[in-house]
């Protein structure tokens, strides 16, 4: 669940809101020194106190970052992705799909290409002057929530993992929920209520932005509107009374509920009890319950049908056939993923304020994540969409019913044009 910066696609004529966003972003590059000294147009670090319960997985302080503008009272909050863990090696960052930032978040996190944030260029939503892709929120106040707890920003537990090296156990602070709760309180106290609020995240951050949506939204209490754009972090339908063959995500959900303390009295699942339509025995009802609870808000979900990353995270530990060499293992993996997607879509379609964009394939990052780097290769050609830009605008502008896009053409995406930087990243092996 990792991504790096990429380059700019050919763009359709910009909408008025997008032109305004570009103008303001350009203005930011020539802002007078006094504005920079006031803390505008730069990444400022916020370190949360230990008394708040916040911490990274190794027990070091949790830090997040904010890039302010004096020209807007809107706010976008970006949740970082990066694997997850319920074993010792994965919590140490060892192996594929292991947890990101096992050694914590340094104060200069937003000023390095050596980590996932990459100066904020990991996604257009976290880069004010993105050279690769315009996004409507680039003129907003931008908050970046790094990921360092191995629990997709949701946990409420401290675990000792010693399965790989009993003599040197890993004490893992699954404090994702405490981090988000403390960050929300800081933002409300120091930034006040935003006019418009967008929560977004990719991969593990897609899960986190969904599961902590109510926590952040209620704390910030936006004056005008609130939206969610969750990228490639679906909470699949997985009722406990079913079997893994019926609900392939069930073993994963059962595992993380226990490991991350989700069912504890102070856990996130417990906090969802009482939301309309939420089934405590089915994590897949979380998204629709949130939409029902906040009928005035807009919710958008995205994924690729050929995603070999989040699907591997979901099934590899629980289905031996997935571990077979390609093509057999890949076919088994995607068969499970394709089994889960229809029920997930049916659940989302039950609420009128939910939209989705389910493309087929992108030849980058194992078809994982549509919002990272740039948006080239994310369209659905059969309905005339070149990228996800109209879907993003639809969720934010709220002028029409949410779009529901599903790609049935399984050939066109293999020849679609990627931006030069995505092609370069593919060439050098990212």
Image: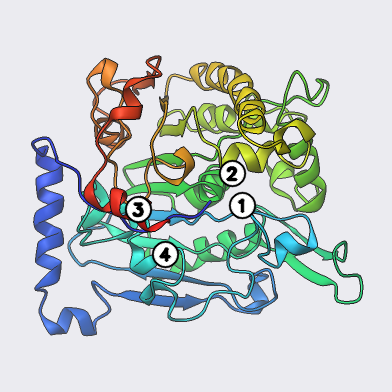
Q: Earlier in the sequence, mark 3 or mark 1?
A: 1
Circle on res. 427? 3
Q: CA distance from mark 3 to mark 1?
A: 30 Å
Residue 380 place in picture, x, y as percent: 31, 23
Name the residue that disc number 2 marks: 211
* Mark 1 closeness class: few <14, some 14–19, many ≥20 residues within 10 Å: many
Q: Nearer the viewer, residue 55 or 295?
A: 55
Circle on res. 152? 1
* Mark 3 closeness class: few <14, some 14–19, many ≥20 residues within 10 Å: few
Circle on res. 86? none
Q: CA distance from mark 3 to mark 2?
A: 36 Å
* Mark 4 closeness class: few <14, some 14–19, many ≥20 residues within 10 Å: many
Locate residue 332 relative to residue 403 in the image: left or right: right
Q: Earlier in the sequence, mark 1 or mark 2?
A: 1
Q: Is residue 372 above or below residue 43?
A: above
The reply to whether the C-beta atoms of the residues labelled 1 and 2 are less than 8 Å apart is yes
* Mark 2 closeness class: few <14, some 14–19, many ≥20 residues within 10 Å: many
Name the residue that disc number 4 marks: 117
Locate residue 71 relative to residue 155 in the image: left or right: left
Residue 145 place in picture, x, y as percent: 48, 62
Q: Earlier in the sequence, mark 3 or mark 2?
A: 2
Q: Earlier in the sequence, mark 4 or mark 3?
A: 4
Q: CA distance from mark 4 to mark 3?
A: 21 Å
């Amino acid at each position: 669940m990792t991504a790096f910066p990429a380059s700019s696609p050919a763009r359709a004529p910009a909408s008025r809101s997008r032109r305004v966003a570009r103008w303001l972003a350009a203005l930011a590059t020539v802002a007078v020194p006094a504005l920079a000294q006031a803390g505008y147009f730069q990444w400022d670090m916020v370190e949360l106190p230990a008394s708040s319960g916040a911490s990274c997985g190794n027990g070091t302080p949790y830090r997040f970052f904010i890039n302010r503008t004096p020209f807007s009272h809107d706010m976008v909050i970006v949740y970082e992705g990066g694997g997850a863990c319920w074993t010792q090696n994965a919590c140490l960052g060892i192996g594929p799909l292991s947890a990101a930032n096992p050694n914590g978040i340094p104060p200069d996190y937003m000023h390095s290409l050596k980590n996932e944030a990459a100066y904020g260029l990991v996604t257009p939503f976290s880069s004010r002057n993105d050279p690769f892709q315009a996004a409507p929120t680039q003129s907003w106040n931008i908050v970046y929530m790094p990921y360092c707890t191995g629990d997709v920003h949701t946990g409420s537990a401290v675990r000792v993992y010693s399965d790989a090296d009993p003599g040197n156990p890993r004490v893992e602070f699954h404090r994702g929920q405490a981090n988000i709760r403390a960050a929300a309180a800081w933002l409300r106290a120091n930034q006040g209520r935003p006019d418009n609020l967008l929560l977004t995240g990719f991969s593990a951050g897609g899960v986190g932005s969904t599961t902590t949506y109510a926590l952040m939204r209620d704390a910030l209490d936006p004056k005008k509107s609130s939206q969610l754009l969750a990228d490639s972090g679906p909470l699949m339908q997985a009722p406990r009374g079913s079997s893994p063959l019926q609900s392939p995500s069930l073993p994963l959900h059962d595992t993380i509920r226990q490991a991350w303390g989700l069912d504890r009295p102070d856990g996130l699942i417990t906090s969802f009890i009482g939301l309309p339509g939420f089934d405590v025995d089915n994590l897949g009802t979380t998204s629709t319950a949130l939409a029902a609870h906040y009928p005035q808000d807009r919710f958008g979900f995205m994924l690729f049908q050929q995603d070999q990353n989040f699907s591997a995270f979901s099934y590899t530990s629980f289905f031996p056939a997935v571990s077979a060499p390609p093509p057999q293992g890949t076919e088994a993996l995607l068969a499970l993923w394709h089994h889960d997607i229809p029920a997930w879509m049916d659940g989302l379609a039950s609420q009128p304020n939910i939209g989705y964009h389910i493309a087929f394939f992108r030849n980058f990052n194992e078809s994982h994540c549509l919002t990272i780097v740039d948006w080239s290769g994310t369209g659905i050609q059969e309905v005339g969409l070149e990228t996800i830009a109209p879907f993003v605008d639809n969720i934010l502008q709220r002028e029409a019913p949410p779009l529901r896009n599903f790609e049935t053409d399984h050939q066109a995406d293999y020849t679609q044009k990627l931006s030069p930087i995505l092609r370069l990243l593919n060439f050098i092996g990212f």
